[in-house]
């Protein structure tokens, strides 16, 4: 197969996993956003639901 001279060489190593601190950050951000979404839906129901 012809490799392009402009592309970086491929490493045969597996990609490094993400750090556990980043995983916790992403998880807590998702939990927070779901919590705020629930608050927003509750506010809409209370405000416009009668």
Image (cartoon, rainbow, N blue to C red):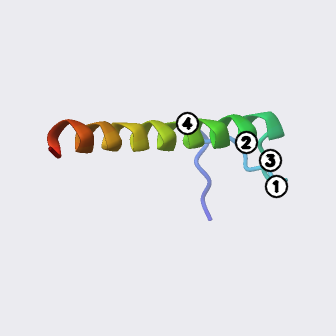
Which residue is label 4 attached to? 32
Check if mark 4's residue and mark 1's residue have beta carbons within 8 Å: no
The mark lying in front, picked from 2 and 4, is 4
Residue at which label 3 appears: 17
Residue at the spot of label 2: 23
Residue on which the image places disc 1 = 14
Residue at far bottom of view: 1
Position of residue 5 measured from the top left corner of the image (x, y, whole percent): 61, 42
| Mark in the foreground, 2 or 3 | 2
Secondary structure state at the residue bearing disc 3: loop
Query: Which residue occupies 24% across, 45% down?
Result: 45
Up-down relation of residue 33 to residue 12 (above or below): above
Q: Is residue 13 left or right of residue 28?
A: right
Between the residue at mark 2 and the residue at mark 1, the CA separation in whole angstroms equals 19 Å
Report the Cα–Cα distance between label 1 and label 3. Answer: 9 Å
SS under mark 4: helix
- N-terminal-most mark, 2 or 4: 2
Q: CA distance from mark 4 to mark 3?
A: 24 Å
Q: Nearer the viewer, mark 1 or mark 3?
A: 3
Q: Nearer the viewer, residue 31 or 38?
A: 38
What percent of the width, then of the height, locates residue 29?
A: 59, 36
Between 49 and 12, the residue placed more toward the observer is 49
Query: Element at badge 2?
Result: helix
Instruction: Measure how far apart labels 2 and 4 are at the Cα level.
Output: 14 Å
- Quarter of the image where the C terminus is located: top left
Q: CA distance from mark 2 to mark 3?
A: 10 Å
What's the distance in space between the residues labelled 4 and 1, CA to CA?
32 Å
User: Residue at the location (82% across, 40% down)?
Assistant: 20
Lower position in the chain sequence, tag 2 or tag 1: 1
Residue at 34% in and 37% down:
40
């Amino acid at each position: 197969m012809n490799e392009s001279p402009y592309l970086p060489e491929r490493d045969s190593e597996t990609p490094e996993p993400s750090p556990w601190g980043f995983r916790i950050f992403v998880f807590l951000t998702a939990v927070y956003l779901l919590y705020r979404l629930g608050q927003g839906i509750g506010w809409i129901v209370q405000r416009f639901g009668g």
